Image: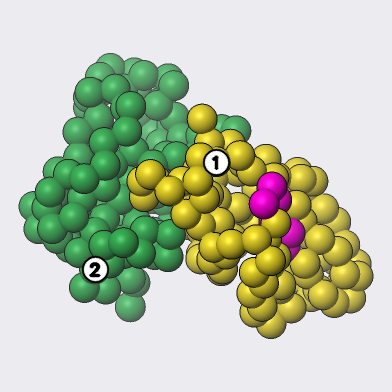
Chain colours: A yellow, B green
Amino acid sequence: EDQVTQSPEALRLQEGESSSLNCSYTVSGLRGLFWYRQDPGKGPEFLFTLYSAGEEKEKERLKATLTKKESFLHITAPKPEDSATYLCAVSPGSNYKLTFGKGTLLTVNP
Amino acid sequence: DTAVSQTPKYLVTQMGNDKSIKCEQNLGHDTMYWYKQDSKKFLKIMFSYNNKELIINETVPNRFSPKSPDKAHLNLHINSLELGDSAVYFCASSQLGQYAEAFFGQGTRLTVV
């Protein structure tokens, strides 16, 4: 069964303090690994797709990387508006279903 | 202009009742989804429709019945509600194959008492 484990569950940073979120996964034949941002009371918002080990994607202060067992979401010099829950999901090679992790709740204090 | 809209946003009901959640998208997408986010925060796919045809039907009690009158609408009807049905239900839409880049609605928080 496909599994996604995200750590830490919660992370509190000061504005400008860079850090990383981790997503460990087991999946039968990775079709893709995906990162989302979810604000309170809203649905997830797609951020990145990573397809193969070694791939990297960037968007503003966020950078996602992928290895064969895990993905990292690096946040450089975060701002309070980066506060949200970040979700990781994987899709197996056999179908188009997504398996999500529980997410990491990021709080950036000014 | 709301891309994916769900109604109602909050739903409190008693055990045993039947309720419906409506979803509409104005993005011109051909595929729509229902997801459930439980108290442990896991988001899980329930159903997916492409052009009014059911293409994903996860292991969901048959008390849950999706209905897609057209490709812009996907409703969820739940019979005989149970306490364990309490969760946030999200509707989403995408073009077929772009399932990971789906646009999500704001969610419907269902509380069964």
- A109 or A59, which lies in front? A59
Q: Is residue A81 visible in the rendered structure shown here?
A: no
- A92 or B36, which lies in front? A92
Q: How far across and down, in percent of the image, does residue A35 sit? A: 59, 60
Disc 1 is placed on an element classified as loop
Instruction: Give me the disc on residue B29.
Output: 2
Q: How far across and down, in percent of the image, does residue B99 sit? A: 37, 58
Give the answer, above or below, for where A31 lies relative to B28.
Answer: above
Three-letter amino acid code at disc 2?
A: His
The image shows a total of numbered marks equal to: 2
What residue is at 64 percent from the left and 74 percent from the top?
Answer: A57
Three-letter amino acid code at disc 1?
A: Val
Question: Would you say A54 lies left or right of B35 here?
Answer: right
What residue is at 61 percent from the left and 53 percent from the top?
Answer: A87
Mark 2 neighbour class, 10 Å CA radius: few under 14, some 14 to 19, many 20 or more: some
Question: Would you say A64 lies left or right of B21 here?
Answer: right
- Callout 2 and callout 1 share a chain: no
Instruction: Give me the disc on residue B52.
Output: none
* Residue occupied by mark 1: A27
Disc 2 is placed on an element classified as loop
Q: CA distance from mark 2 to mark 1?
A: 28 Å
Give the chain of mark 2. Answer: B
- Residue lying furthest bottom in this view? A60
Say if mark 2 contacts mark 1, CB within 8 Å: no
Mark 1 neighbour class, 10 Å CA radius: few under 14, some 14 to 19, many 20 or more: some
Range covered by the magenta-colored residues: A68-73
